[in-house]
Image: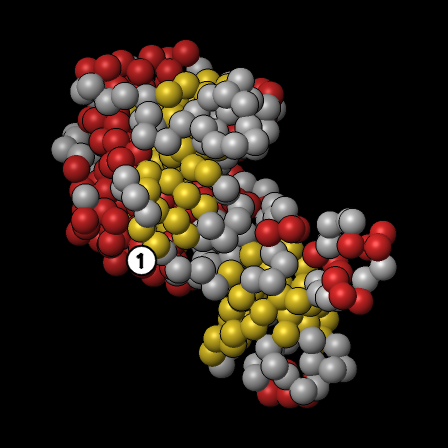
Amino acid sequence: MVELKNLLVKLAEAHGISGYEGAVRAIVEQEIKPYVDEIKTDGLGNLIATKRGKKPSVMIAAHLDEIGLMVKYIEEEGFMRFSTIGGWFDQTLLNQRVLLHTDSGTVTGVIGSKPPHRMKKEEREKPIKAEDMFIDVGASSRADAEQMGIAIGTPVTIDSHFASLKNERVTCKAFDNRSGVAIMIEALKRVNTEFEVYAVGTVQEEVGLKGARTSAFGLDPNVAIAIDVDIAGGHPGIEKKDAAVELDKGPVITVSDASGRGIITPPSVLKWLKDTAARYNVDYQLSVSEGGMTDAAIIHLTRSGIPTGVIGVPARYIHSPVELLSMNDIDNSAELLARAIERVGDYF
């Protein structure tokens, strides 16, 4: 599992908000190249790696992008105001160190706000909103910031590094969804199949599932699986009835998400994944959730409809700089995916 962890480190520490996934895409292309017959990038920026074979064809989708920020205004004093890109909980942003990715290089900054020592009592009792925060890169003026290469539209990511915890648990930014990307690559290393496989690193998932829409339309696969994170409970502040998924209990097979507004997984796909897990003794969990959806929500509505499922990785604290998951779940998710690909002809 050392190689798998090293791959996850490389992917999670790479930077690429929605629409700016190039650095992540380059890593995936390098890692996946030995295991496929063709690699291309489509017009929107999706990486599409094809392992040729016979029908039925299976599409694996794992989104490359992470949530982040974008500079929207530079004040005269050199501070940057920003827009959020993707679903942030504003409180997780305050006092974080960030990286601004300019055309001339990376600039380090911090997110600040009005200090509590200068707030009125009613201000201190309210959460600080992102719109009241700013980025400080040490610039003395707008001109100074611009000389660093910072401009309106500069993408910004959290400066967070991978760390190993006890019991094969790890933490970093962007496990949503670099963990899914790592699983997709690892599954291709393990798989021995006669069927055609499209491994797709999708773009702009966090801002509307956009890459899944265009890539699925272009490929028109017979069946598809999206790989993403799934919210894990098992910690203070959340009841089991609200988040029954737990770390180290195996990959999550989604039955339904977003109260059915996302995907209601077809029985044929559920049978395929559950039968495969049982055959190869891979423990798994089932998930029915009210919130959030994945690339599967768009893929299954493409053209005349594509049978689609989701394999999820249990993860805590998603959409934060300290996302946490278990390497055991990563390993077992890759195993389930590889074996499912090999058996797709028995079901579709």
The residue nearer to you, when weighing 168 against 18, is 168
The answer to whether residue 264 is left or right of residue 328 is right
Residue 337 position within the rendered picture, expressed as x and y whole percent measured from the top left: 27, 30
Asked if residue 320 can be seen in this view, the reply is yes
Locate residue 269: give its quadrant: top left
- Which residue is tagged 1? 10
Q: What colour scheme has been applied to the protein in the rendered image? A: secondary structure
Q: Horizontally, is 117 left or right of 281 in the view?
A: right
Tell which of 163 and 176 is nearer to you: 163
Q: Is residue 184 visible?
A: no
Q: Is residue 202 left or right of residue 143?
A: left
Q: Quadrant of the N terminus?
A: top left
Amino acid identity at mark 1: Lys
Residue in the foreground of this view, choosing between 122 and 252: 122
Q: Residue at x 31, y 51 (%)?
A: 164
Q: Horizontal and vertical percent for residue 8?
A: 31, 50
Q: Residue at x 17, y 37 (%)?
A: 190
SS for dot 1: helix
Local packing at callout 1 (Cα closer than 10 Å; few below 14, some 14-19, many 20+) is some
Residue 277 in the image, given as x and y percentages of width and height: 25, 19
